Image (tube, rainbow, N blue to C red):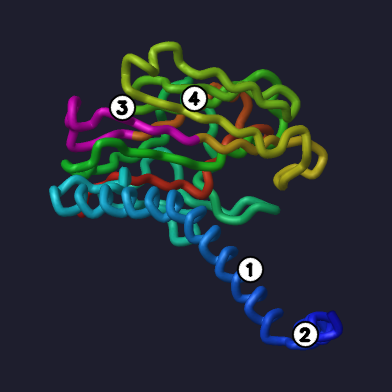
């Protein structure tokens, strides 16, 4: 009996048994992590395999094809008609001021489209400055209205055209600032919005150019109210 007790005490004092237990627990934990990560790794490998397959078969995984145009009008307004780049107090260089164009696309530019592009996009910031009282600025694609912004005392209201789905066009409007002074006349309130337009299905309806236009029915001159465009970008463009 004493011998058994002595052996048991010796076992408790021996550290080799504890090390063995530690390694057993550690090995079990590593095995569990490996089993858990198998599905995650498998999903990633399948995704990578799909991407490689698409690239090898000639199908691009990137939906943006062609060149990009971007301008904050710091270097002028080359290519634009109906307005020039000017410095606006408190904001910087913009395309404007855009006064009354009888609601027609008096300010415009043609963009050559890449023949391989499936879609083209246009995005810009729109400023409505000073004494607007229900006047409207309208955005056009190829001479047809896609949306309009009506501004009353610095508060903008956006309305999209009703036939955009049939034309393969998506328009998104984001209100950034309203009823605040952004520049210009310090006694007036202004508004700022961001508008983005995507023209889709270009392979089904191919075109060499897309014309972007903007018009205004502002009743007063630039001394009282005007629109301005800034930070304009376009994608899906041809080399020329």
The secondary element bearing badge 1 is classed as helix
**The magenta segment:** 196-211
**Residue 127, picture quadrant:** top right
Q: Are marks 3 and 2 in contact (CB under 8 Å)?
A: no
- Spatial CA span between label 4 and label 1: 70 Å
Q: Which residue is mark 4?
A: 138
- Spatial CA span between label 2 and label 1: 25 Å
- Spatial CA span between label 4 and label 3: 13 Å
Compare residues 140 and 64 and report the one nearer the observer: 64
**Residue 180, picture quadrant:** top right
Placement of 184 over or under 160, stated as above or below: below
Placement of 189 over or under 155, stated as above or below: below
Residue at image x 46%, y 46%?
232
The answer to whether residue 190 of the structure is visible from this angle is yes
Number of the front mark, 4 or 1: 1
Looking at the figure, which quarter contains the N terminus? bottom right
Q: Which residue is mark 1?
A: 25
């Amino acid at each position: 009996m004493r011998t058994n007790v002595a052996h048991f005490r010796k076992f408790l004092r021996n550290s080799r048994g504890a090390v063995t237990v530690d390694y057993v627990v550690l090995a079990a934990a590593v095995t569990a992590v490996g089993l858990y990560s198998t599905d995650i790794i498998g999903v990633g490998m399948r995704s990578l395999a799909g991407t490689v397959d698409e690239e090898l078969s000639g199908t691009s995984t990137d939906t943006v094809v062609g060149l990009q145009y971007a301008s904050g009008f710091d270097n002028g307004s080359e290519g634009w008609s109906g307005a020039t780049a000017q410095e606006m107090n408190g904001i910087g260089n913009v395309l404007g001021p855009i006064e009354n164009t009888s609601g027609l696309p008096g300010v415009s530019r043609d963009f050559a489209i890449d023949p391989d592009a499936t879609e083209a996009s246009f995005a810009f910031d729109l400023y409505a400055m000073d004494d607007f009282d229900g006047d409207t600025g309208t955005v056009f694609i190829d001479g047809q209205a896609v949306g309009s912004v009506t501004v009353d005392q610095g508060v903008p209201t956006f309305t999209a055209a009703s036939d955009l789905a049939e034309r393969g066009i998506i328009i998104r409007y984001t209100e950034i600032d309203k009823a605040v002074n952004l520049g210009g006349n310090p006694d007036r309130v202004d508004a700022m919005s961001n508008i983005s337009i995507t023209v889709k299905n270009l392979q089904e309806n191919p075109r060499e150019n897309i014309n972007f236009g903007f018009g205004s029915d502002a009743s007063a001159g630039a001394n009282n109210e005007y629109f301005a465009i800034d930070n304009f970008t376009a994608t899906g463009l041809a080399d020329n």
